[in-house]
Amino acid sequence: MGKIDKALDTLHAMERGSESAALSYAAGTRAGMAVTLVYLCLLLSVPLQDLQRLVWFAVYPVVWASLGGVGYGRVMRRSLVVLPLIAFVGIFNPIVDTSPAFSVGSVVVSRGWVSFMSILIRGMLSVQAVVTLMSVCGFADVCRELRAVHVPSSLTMQLQLVYRYIGVMLEELQTMARARAARGYGRRSFPLRMWGTMTGQLFLRSVDRAERIHRAMLARGFDGSMPRYTPSERHGAHGVGSVVWAVAWTGVLVWLRFAHIGSIFNIVR
C-alpha cells in the first residue's frame, strides 16, 4: 500500500471513528469533547518549569487511545507531523535562558532547556489529545456535536468542507499517481517540469470534482448547513456512562494539575 492509500485510509478512519465496544459503555462524543477541553486548559496552565507534572498528563491520551481501540502508538505517529513546528516555537529558549534549573548527577540543565522540553511536551500532548478525540469519536460526530452545543454553523460547515476537500484532493492524486505509474514504464524519477504540470492538473481536477460534489449537494436540498442526524448509539449517548466518564476524568486531571508531585531531580535553588 502506497503513502497516498495510507493517507486516504487514515482520513476515512478518522471520519468514522473507532468501532471499539469498550468505549460505547464509557463516553459519548460530547463527554469526550468536554474532557478534552478541560484537559487542554489544565495542561496549558502548567508552568513551563514544572516539567514533571507535564509528563504525568500523558496518562490521558495513552489510556483513552487504548480504551478506544486506536492504540497510542498510532496516535503518537500521527502527532509527529507537527513536531518541527512545535520545536521551532521554543528553539531559542536554551540560548536565551542559561540559568541552572536542576542537576542530574554532575550535569546541570539550564532553564532554557527545561522550557524548551516543556513546550515540546505540552504541544505534543495537546495534539495527541485532539487526534485521539477525532480517531475515537470520528470527525463527523465531533462536528455534529459542536453544532448541537450552538457553535456557529458557518464554522462547523467550513471544518466539514475542508476535511472533505482534503479527501477529494487525495483521491484525485491517487488517480494521477496510478496513471503515471501505469504509463511510466518503471521510471521512478521525472523531470521537474512534469511535476509542475501534474500539480496544476491536480488543482484543476480537484476543483472540478469539488464543483460536481457541490452541485450534487444542491440537488439534494443542501441549504448551507448539514442536516442534523440522530446521534448513533455508539458515540451519541449522553447517559450515566458519559457523566461518569466526564466526572472521573475531570477529577483525575484536576488532581494531576494541583496535587503535589514529589521531585525526582535535585532542584537547584
Image: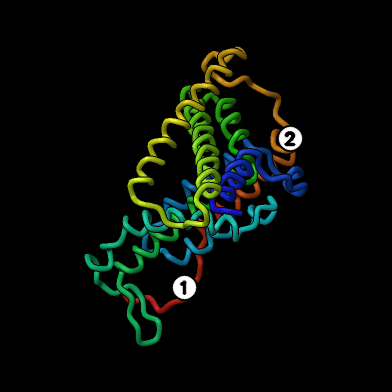
Mark number, residue 239: 2
The answer to whether 5 is drawn above or below residue 55 in the figure is above
Tell me where residue 176 appears, x and y as whole percent: 51, 41
Q: Classify 75 as above or below 97.
A: above
Q: Nearer the viewer, residue 42 or 180?
A: 180
- Location of residue 265 (image quadrant): bottom left
Image location of residue 13, percent across then percent down: 63, 44
**Res. 250 visible in picture:** no
Q: Say which residue appears at 39% left-offset and 65% top-offset.
A: 117
The percent coordinates of residue 5 (x first, y second) are 59, 48
Residue 196 percent coordinates (x, y): 35, 43
Q: Quadrant of residue 207?
A: top left
Q: Residue at (56%, 14%) from the top-left corner?
A: 218
Mark 1: which amino acid?
A: Ser
What residue type is disc 2 on?
Gly
Disc 1 to disc 2, how far (Cα)?
A: 40 Å
In the figure, is residue 49 to the left or right of 176? left
Q: How is the image coloured?
A: rainbow
Of the residues under marks 1 and 2, which one precedes in the sequence?
2
Look at the image and tell me in which quarter the C terminus lies. Answer: bottom left
Look at the numbered disc 1 and give the secondary structure of its residue: loop
- In the rendered view, does 14 fall on the left or right side of 207? right
- Residue 263 image label: 1
